[in-house]
Amino acid sequence: MSDDKQPMGQTRIHKTGTQQPAPHLASYEQAAAQFRWDDAANLLDGLPGGAGLNIAYEAVDRHLAHGRGDKTALRWLGRNGERRELSYAGLAQASNRFANALHSLGVQPGEGVFVLMGRLPELYVALLGALKARCVVTPLFSAFGPEPIATRAEMGDARVLVTTPELYLRKVQGLRQRLPGLRHVIVVGEAPAGDASLHSWAALVDAANPDYAIAPTDPESVSLLHFTSGTTGKPKGAMHVHAAVLAHAVTGRYALDLHDDDVFWCTADPGWVTGTSYGIIAPLVCGVTNVVVEAEFDAQSWYGVLASERVTVWYTAPTAIRMMMKLGAAALQGYDLSALRFMASVGEPLNPEAVLWGQQAFGLPFHDNWWQTETGGIMIANYAAMDIKPGSMGKPLPGITAAIVQRDSSGLRLIDSPDTDGELALKTPWPSMMRGYLHEDERYRKCFVDGWYLTGDLARRDADGYYWFVGRADDVIKSSGHLIGPFEVESALLEHPAVAEAGVIGIPDPMAGEVVKAFVALKPGFAPDEALRNELLGHARKRLGAAVAPKQIEFRNNLPKTRSGKIMRRLLKARELGLPEGDLSTLESDEK
Ligand code: AMP
């Protein structure tokens, strides 16, 4: 691989074709032209005897049938240095026990099983076991406070909750009155005494029968319920089905290039859809060894994991990458990262500098890819054998038709001309598409027009077919008639050596409608003074032109972010304008 020195945005990272192992997607054009979801179905086995399709069977039990039971499925690294390995056979037995435990409690297929805990092995066992029992699983962030837990458990009609004694006492016990439908709580550890609805994992699950035959499973039955934050009101419960596993099998191979011998690490928490689809399902379906790290982000310990576990494929997120960039490439010295061969990023715009920094620091670029809770799997990606244009999300997955559209009163207009902003739309259907928003048919129906799913993201496609993220439909700034994508402005600011993070919003202006305001967190060693503010304003004006550049810059120590690492521009804007802050359930780190 090599990169041309061209202005940012037009840089290309060429792939040489000598990668080992050879990428699954050797020729994007050929695969895109020939791909059929029906043909891809042979990546899966289906339940024995033609009894349907179950995610957990494809992820775990199937590998035993193919003689891979002894292979390590999960390699868990605890926060205090503990290690635990579960083979595919071990994971099959453990999840069987969990499914049997649910049966012993009288839990029925279709009922809601919620999981609230940190990244402990039991989380993975419970999720797979509940899928085997054909329950509907919702993983929640362990960092959620009582209110978001209650809202989601109420909406999703949680019948069973799997958690730890500490989280139960601290966050759930006081909610029981509000959750009359919650009949059983399984705690990983000693169950607090005096309540018959509390069961200790050891007594209930470890003691259960390790044999379990998955009952016939309709591929269209609901498997996972993932909550995603709306801009207003309650979170939306996106319902996914067992058939989605085909998209995980395909994207695991095409977008993450997973091969048999890979050691894979997805840094996302299963409380976010990425941590479930790509931190559990896709790697197991592809039969690789899946590394799970309990501890939160810390650049040095992450480098340690990459080195000691000989991670080959790494899937992470822009915020973490930017934090690593802040420390500089020197922090990588002394770690043997020679096993690493493919790095990918998702969740928010990946700035071109970050892609190039990967190349400089790791000798590999980050491959950005795009998807959202509603799409159930990766939809647009930079593939292993395809040139990367840093800053671009890449091209649609073979099997997916994407378009840039505009909505008007007569329906949708597809925008064919390149480099034109519009809403990103995906042609329906595909296997992992959400099948509904829980209890919100109208909100669901509004996402679809003329056979297209509207993503709510603004993007553009260039003449080579690469997609570029512009912003959320509701984040875009209109200034003096120009549509301005905050990402573009943030990227320009991030090119400046002093800038660690940038969040850009539009603020009302009597002349221009809106003007651009930037909130900036600086790297260590830079002082937030007038001289630097003017320098940044000048840098952005030079890079972007006066119509697009920010008019104001405010320094902050930190920017508010979601658990999945997205800078919450909506919150910056609400605070700036003194508006209600809205749903803060996904807020992870704040400005203070
Ligand atoms: P979530 O459903 O929480 O995963 O959020 C999905 C949203 O995150 C998308 O609609 C985008 O707005 C944003 N997003 C995800 N991946 C990317 C990406 N690669 N580039 C830019 N935005 C992204």
Image: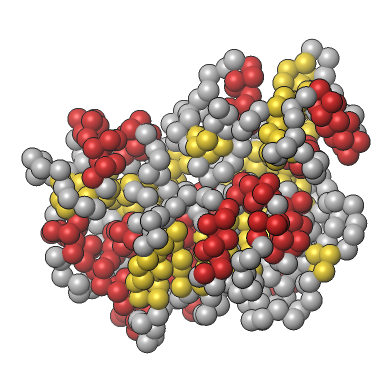
How many marks are shown on the rendered structure? Answer: 0
Q: Residue at x 70, y 52 (%)?
A: 328
Colour mapping: secondary structure
Picture quadrant of residue 566: top right
Q: Residue at x 40, y 80 (%)?
A: 71
Farthest-out residue, top: 510
Q: Residue at x 40, y 69 (%)?
A: 74
Examine the rendered structure and indicate whether residue 346 appears above or below residue 231: below
- Residue 286: give x, y in percent of width and height: 48, 74
Q: Residue at x 27, y 66 (%)?
A: 95
- Residue 108: give x, y in percent of width and height: 20, 55
The quadrant of the image that shows the C terminus is: top right
Pick the residue in front: 476 or 71.
71
Examine the rendered structure and indicate whether residue 458 appears above or below residue 261: above
Pick the residue in front: 250 or 169.
169
Picture quadrant of residue 52: bottom left
Picture quadrant of residue 457: top right
- Residue 247: give x, y in percent of width and height: 52, 65
Examine the rendered structure and indicate whether residue 392 appears above or below residue 549: below
Residue 113 located left or right of residue 567? left
- Residue 158: give x, y in percent of width and height: 27, 43
Pick the residue in front: 541 or 38.
541
Residue 300 located left or right of residue 322? left
Q: Is residue 548 visible?
A: no
